[in-house]
Image (spheres, coloured by chain):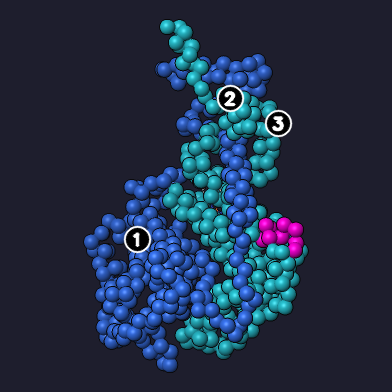
Amino acid sequence: MERQNKEEDKKFDIKETQAWKAVFGDLLFGEFKPLSPFNSLMRGIAKIMQLHPYNMSVGGKRIILYTFCLGGLSVFFFTLLACTGAFLMIYYNPDVNSAYANIEDMRYIVPFGVLIRNMHRWTAHLMVLFVALHMLRVFLTAAYKPPRELNWIVGVILLVMTLLASFTGYLLPWDQLAYWGVTIGTSMGENAPLLGAKGPFAILEHGKDVNSILVGGTSVGQPTLLRFYLLHAIAIPLGIAGLMGFHFWRIRRAGGVSGPL
Amino acid sequence: MAELEKESKGNGEVIVRMSEKEWENVKNINVKSDYKEGFETLTPKEQDYTVKHLRDSVGIEFLAGLIFTFIIMVWSLFMNAPLKELANPADTPIDERAPWYFIGLQELLIFFDPWLAGVVLPSILLVGLLILPFIDPHKETGIGRYTFRDRPVAVSAFGFGFAMWYILIIIGQFFRGPARMFYWPWEDKAVLKELPVVEMVTFPIAVGIAFFIIYFGVCVILPKYIFENFYKTLGIIRYYIFMSLCAIMLLIPIKIFLRYVFDVKYILSLQIFNTILNF
Ligand code: HEM
């Protein structure tokens, strides 16, 4: 009888194996030790980022089934895009005569160029997708309700800027895909009521309407490439970074992420 | 290591066994008695003890980042980002398409004039999103949890719009071949389809105007009398904004339906001065 009990106690539990503990032990699922270096590091990071409030439900594991990390991953993708983008900037020149060749060089000559370019492109897709999913999660958990209305609005602006960042980047390789994709996209501006040359009640002429501010002329060309490059590599990322900081600060002010409590 | 020793039933006391060192850390903390389950109001010293939470959530975020770094690396190793021939303004490809996140708009272009599909509808969508926190009348319902039952109207309306957006993207991305013609997945996109030669109809002005009057009457005015409680909770301004936004959103599938089933080009074609407005 006693022996049986002992055997039951010894049931195989992967979390008790040395390998598991070595990899995940204190890191993820281990017992809480107030003074372990990892904990102080985590607290330090959290303090610097001002993101995770201290006063939160103990039992953070559940939080993954709440936010699904969608916002956090959007931040992560943004950071990854900034890093890979900085690398791409070294080899890219926003000039219609050389842009395409620069990209080809990246693919065939620059060490790891093709890898970095691919990462930049695929991460951008993921970011657009995850920001949208993050919005869905925020809606479904009613996190836009007081006191978080302002953060919802900031979020919508972030979503638009994320789309614009992707769209302006789309033109930079200066291939057929880029050229015609952007031609379609910017031609929308031409059709704006009042302000577009082809839209209803147009008051501005072709070449002087809102579309031409974006494109820098009557059709997509060198001025467009330069404008899109500056927007893509400087203005929009700075804007997103600034708004993100504000977004996080508002989360803190609201007393942290809305649930689950 | 602090351990829960036992919980006495009557007075809500909790007995905790801990080492002397731990006691040194916590003895000066006066634990507040009124705390919600799993949520404590903490003094600065107690904050140390929420590190467990931080470690869990930051750790999980770290792990999520790691997993996605791996996914992106593998994806990038095996799949190259597209690069076609050098841009050539003189050579319009037959299958020109916007990037996928804008392909929903391009899809709308098939059914609406560009000023509607590319400018007015997206603007309405954006404004709708921005004012959404203010037209939701229930300021506290459902915060912090996933629930459909407590917010059926809000979740249905948003869910409908979100789903429509992605369905349009999927159709635009995977079901459209050359010249934006519809292709089933088993049809070969290399085979050019001929443009169908059907005479598309535009309703006469009177019919068009009547359609919109009746449509908005049914969608916006009528529910006011049927769902009086709903109208009262929303209040007059919120009610009209919300119902108009929903009505406009519903017009998109309605127009698509009319186009495919009855070959309707425009429901209403208005000429104002020298501008033609087609809906
Ligand atoms: C660049 C895009 C964005 C980034 C990087 C970002 C990042 C984050 C992060 C890290 C959080 C913490 C909770 C979580 O991970 O879910 C958060 C929360 C939040 N986000 Fe975003 N977000 C972005 C876009 C948006 C959008 C598009 C919306 C809505 C339209 C939005 C609205 C909110 C709100 C209301 C919260 C508070 C949620 C709560 O307390 O439960 N954000 N965001």
What element does badge 3 sit on?
Answer: helix
Q: Are marks 1 and 3 on the same chain?
A: no
- Chain B takes which shade in the image? blue
Percent x, y of residue B252: 37, 70
**Residue B244: quarter of image:** bottom left
Task: Residue under label 3, please give it.
Answer: A37
Q: Is residue B146 depicted above or below B89 in this figure?
A: above
- Boundaries of the magenta span: A109-117
Q: Is residue B206 visible?
A: yes
User: Chain A is which colour?
Assistant: cyan
Say above or below: A204 vs B240: below
Dot 2, crowdedness within 10 Å: few (<14), some or many (≥20)?
A: few
Disc 1 sits on a residue from what chain?
Answer: B
Which image quarter is the N terminus of chain B in? top right
In the image, B242 versus B210, the foreground residue is B210
- Residue where numbered disc 2 is placed: A17
The x and y percentages for residue A205 are 57, 89
Q: Which residue is mark 1?
A: B235
